Image (cartoon, helix red, strand yellow):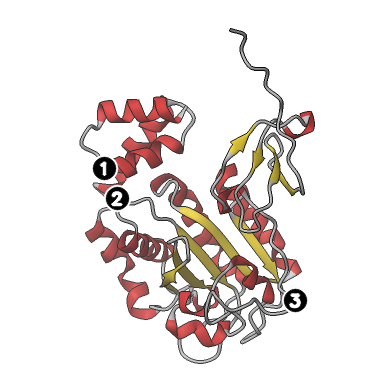
């Protein structure tokens, strides 16, 4: 119960930022686990996670691979875009330096008293010129393992989604390995767009389904994302796949329904103004034409 978790955290840390405490309360099922998570976070912040320590640890990346991970713009809902260009990963730099750089970027844009989230774009395509190492995808696995073990606990409720693109068929095993290290909530936020990851390959059209625009991509990488609309008011390119709706994408209004197969809930608010039936047990979401509310007998006077 998040309310019980929040009450416990408030009791022990009355001066902590409200938004920060709420994130940690939401991230765990019991007050005991939420309290343990927040204590571990404060301990990390006083040691390895201190801003000065993170900057010191991230120095090799900032000096030798500054464009490996960079900040873009914000999405229409206010999420911060972070672009990771995997082919810029160098095995000569310790994986801990890359993790520290990711933390520095998040600390730069995610304030303690803010509920802002990030959208991480992982571009797997190789590139030409200085700064590109074009190592096999397996070379960066130690970094992703280290990141997967840190971010969910030290930055809970900060991730909107991770979009990995383009991913060739043989690399799906690597994604499964990363997913296996994550909790179910974080695992569900990883989206994969299939395609060829050859050097300077075109950006896959599937990325357009996530309502991204060129101005949300860091300036140095926009030429590699020309398929994205320049402005959110412009139509998406022909052939853009339709993205499956998700609970995370829309404001929700829940009402009972008479359909026993639907677990008594429907999502009413959506950009198309049409309702979505939600099967809460499985997480399945299906667009429907009509909603039949459950009849509730008025109380007798």
Q: Residue at x 51, y 55 (%)?
A: 160
Furthest residue to the bottom?
Answer: 129
Q: Which mark is residue 17?
A: 1
Residue named by callout 3: 239
Q: Earlier in the sequence, mark 1 or mark 3?
A: 1
**Does 196 sit above or below residue 108?**
below
Instruction: Kindly report the distance in space between the C-alpha atoms of the residues bearing marks 2 and 1.
Output: 6 Å
**Does 75 sit above or below residue 298?**
below
Q: Earlier in the sequence, mark 2 or mark 3?
A: 2
Tell me whether the residue at label 2 lies in contact with that at label 3, contact meaning CB atoms closer than 8 angstroms.
Answer: no
Within the image, what quadrant is residue 219 found in?
bottom left
Residue named by callout 2: 112
**Does 220 sit above or below residue 269?**
below
Left or right of residue 142, residue 259 in this image:
right
Q: Nearer the viewer, residue 7 or 36?
A: 7
Within the image, what quadrant is residue 234 found in?
bottom right
Q: Residue at x 32, y 36 (%)?
A: 39
Instruction: Kindly report the distance in space between the C-alpha atoms of the residues bearing marks 2 and 3.
Output: 40 Å
């Amino acid at each position: 119960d998040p309310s019980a978790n929040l009450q416990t955290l408030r009791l022990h840390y009355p001066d902590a930022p409200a938004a920060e405490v709420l994130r940690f309360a939401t991230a765990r099922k019991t007050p005991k686990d939420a309290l343990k998570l927040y204590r571990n976070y404060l301990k990390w912040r006083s040691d390895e996670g201190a801003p000065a320590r993170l900057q010191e640890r991230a120095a090799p990346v900032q000096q030798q691979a500054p464009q490996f991970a960079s900040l873009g713009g914000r999405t229409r809902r206010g999420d911060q875009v972070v672009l990771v260009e995997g082919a810029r990963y160098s095995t000569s730099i310790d994986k801990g330096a890359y993790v520290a750089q990711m933390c520095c970027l998040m600390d730069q844009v995610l304030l303690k008293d803010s509920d802002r989230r990030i959208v991480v774009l992982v571009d797997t395509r190789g590139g030409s010129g200085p700064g590109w190492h074009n190592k096999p995808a397996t070379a960066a696995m130690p970094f992703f393992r280290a990141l997967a073990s840190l971010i969910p606990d030290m930055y809970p409720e900060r991730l909107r989604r991770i979009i990995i693109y383009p991913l060739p068929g043989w690399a799906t095993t690597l994604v499964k390995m990363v997913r296996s290290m994550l909790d179910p909530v974080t695992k569900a936020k990883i989206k994969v767009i299939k395609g060829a990851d050859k050097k300077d390959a075109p950006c896959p059209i599937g990325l357009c389904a996530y309502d991204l625009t060129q101005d949300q991509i860091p300036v140095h990488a926009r030429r590699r994302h020309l398929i994205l609309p320049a402005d959110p008011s412009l139509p998406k390119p022909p052939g853009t796949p339709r993205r499956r709706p998700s609970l995370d994408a829309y404001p929700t209004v829940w009402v009972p329904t008479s359909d026993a197969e639907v677990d008594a809930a429907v999502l009413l608010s959506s950009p198309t103004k049409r309702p979505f039936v939600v099967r809460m047990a499985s997480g399945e979401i299906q667009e429907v034409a009509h909603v039949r509310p459950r009849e509730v007998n008025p109380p007798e006077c």
